[in-house]
Image: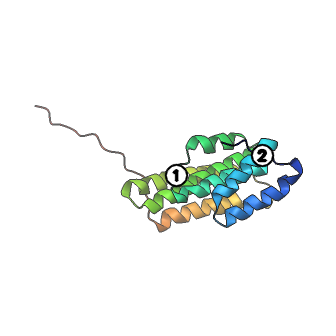
Amino acid sequence: MAELKSLHKDAIPAALEKAERYRLLNEPGEAESICLDILVVDPENQHAIIMLLLALTDRFEKGYGISDTQTKELLTRLKSEYDRAYYSGIVAERRAKMKLRQNTPDCRFQAHDLLREAMHWFEKAEPLRPPGHDDAILRWNTCARIIERNKLVPREEEEPIEFPLE
């Protein structure tokens, strides 16, 4: 592979705007590439880490294999406890939606579990939120409505089979 060119630090704000536009145009691969370029120059740039995380989760729907390891590593790089909780919820919610679209019985159970996980993270984020910032509440309500609308239920624990004594 050819050696990549380095972005100038002054170009970061414009590059972040471009990454956002690519996400909105449903081009997460381009947004991901821009964020990676930003993070080479400014490894702690929280906006770029969040944008990269969202670009990766945008790719769930496109059938790309995005590993839990990739998203978890990015989540650990977030400095704000609120951001870590909120975006952990976003990752779980987006994985759940992908599972739900697969529309198999097992995927419906997985979607339920992932939505409940997302709700857990949103509940954790709620008391940490900045004033007037109710995104965690909105996301929690969305997850609850998805569960209700789709009549999702947890997988029932299998009862042990009892054999008659001889």
Residue 133: % across, % down: 77, 60
Left/right of residue 62 with respect to residue 35 in the rendered view: left
Mark 2, Cα crowd under 10 Å, few <14 / some 14-19 / many 20+, is: few
Locate the C terminus and report the quarter of the image it occupies.
Answer: top left
Q: Which residue is at the front of the view, 133 or 62?
A: 62
The residue lying at 53 percent from left, 53 percent from top is 64
Q: Is residue 21 visible?
A: yes
Left/right of residue 46 with respect to residue 92 in the rendered view: right
Q: Which residue is at the front of the view, 52 or 88?
A: 52
In the displayed structure, 78 sits above or below 138; it is: above
Mark 1, Cα crowd under 10 Å, few <14 / some 14-19 / many 20+, is: many
Query: Disc 2 or disc 1, which is closer to the eye?
Result: 2
Q: Tell me the element at label 1.
A: helix
Q: Tell me the element at label 2.
A: loop
Q: What is the quadrant of residue 16 in the picture?
A: bottom right
The residue lying at 48 percent from left, 68 percent from top is 149
Q: What is the quadrant of residue 75 in the picture?
A: top right
Q: Amino acid at mark 2?
A: Lys
Q: Amino acid at mark 1?
A: Leu
Residue at the spot of label 2: 5
